[in-house]
Amino acid sequence: MNNNKIQRSSKLLAICLKILRIVVFIAVGVEISAIIWLAAVSEDVISTTIGSIHIFSPIVNTADYSKSELIAQFCVNITKQSIVIAMLFLAGAIFKDISREYTPFAAKQTKRLKAISKLMVLLAIIPASVEILMMQILAPTVKVYVSFELSFILVAVVFFCLAQIFDYGGVLQQQSDETL
């Protein structure tokens, strides 16, 4: 009875993560479209249009951004979202396998958790690096203030610890199966 509950909840989580992955993928498409649009129109059209639309950020007035800064910000967002899509894909695969096989302690789950941990470190480092690079290419005279997300590194450590726990659980599972 308990196994069925775990399998059902794992299947539900796998579906939810797939839906979330699709939503983030659509957001990436919208931001790529925005970059193409920004590259095609003049600075005057951009400031007028963005001044009347407040979807980019509820906190910051995006009308104050230059064309180059907006393109750089969209590139950073695409980078972040691409890494998140990869993490959602791995997490979905974990839950999909658990819903089929029940055991979360397989070696492939440990590898996936370690991969999520590595992607989390990349999520802390790569977007800031992309922002610096894009601003140097698009607007070298603009001062760039970036911050690295150190909290993501802490989460990466937690995922790595989880992977180690799953690895140990796999060893215990194997010993239990050999005993029977």
Image: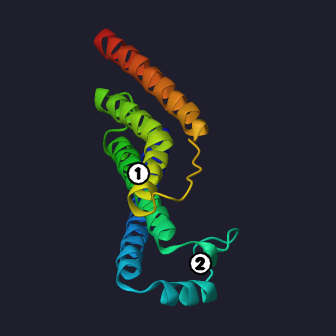
Q: Quadrant of residue 33?
A: bottom left
- Crowding around mark 1 (Cα neighbors within 10 Å: few <14, some 14 to 19, many 20+) is some
Is residue 82 toward the left or the right of residue 144 in the image?
left
How far apart marks 2 and 1 lie (CA) works out to: 25 Å
Horizontal and vertical percent for residue 11?
Answer: 41, 53
> What amino acid type is highlighted by mark number 1?
Leu
Considering depth in this image, is 9 or 143 the residue closer to the camera?
143
Q: Position of residue 74 (x, y in %)?
A: 45, 66
Between disc 2 and disc 1, whose residue precedes?
Answer: 2
Residue 106 image point, x, y percent: 32, 28
Q: How many marks?
A: 2
In the image shown, does 21 or 95 lie closer to the viewer? 21
Mark 2: which amino acid? Ile
Q: Is residue 107 left or right of residue 104?
A: left
Image-based side of 167 in relation to 9, left or right: left
- Residue at 44% from the left image edge and 45% from the top image edge: 129
Q: Residue at x 43, y 54 (%)?
A: 136
Quarter of the figure with residue 168: top left
Q: How is the image coloured?
A: rainbow
Q: Which residue is mark 2?
A: 55
Residue 43 at least partly seen: yes
Question: Between residues 88 and 30, which one lies in front from this camera angle?
Answer: 30
- Disc ID at residue 25: none
Label 2: few (<14), some or many (≥20) within 10 Å? few
Residues 70 and 109: in front is 70
Classify residue 150 by image quadrant. top right
Residue on which the image places disc 1: 133
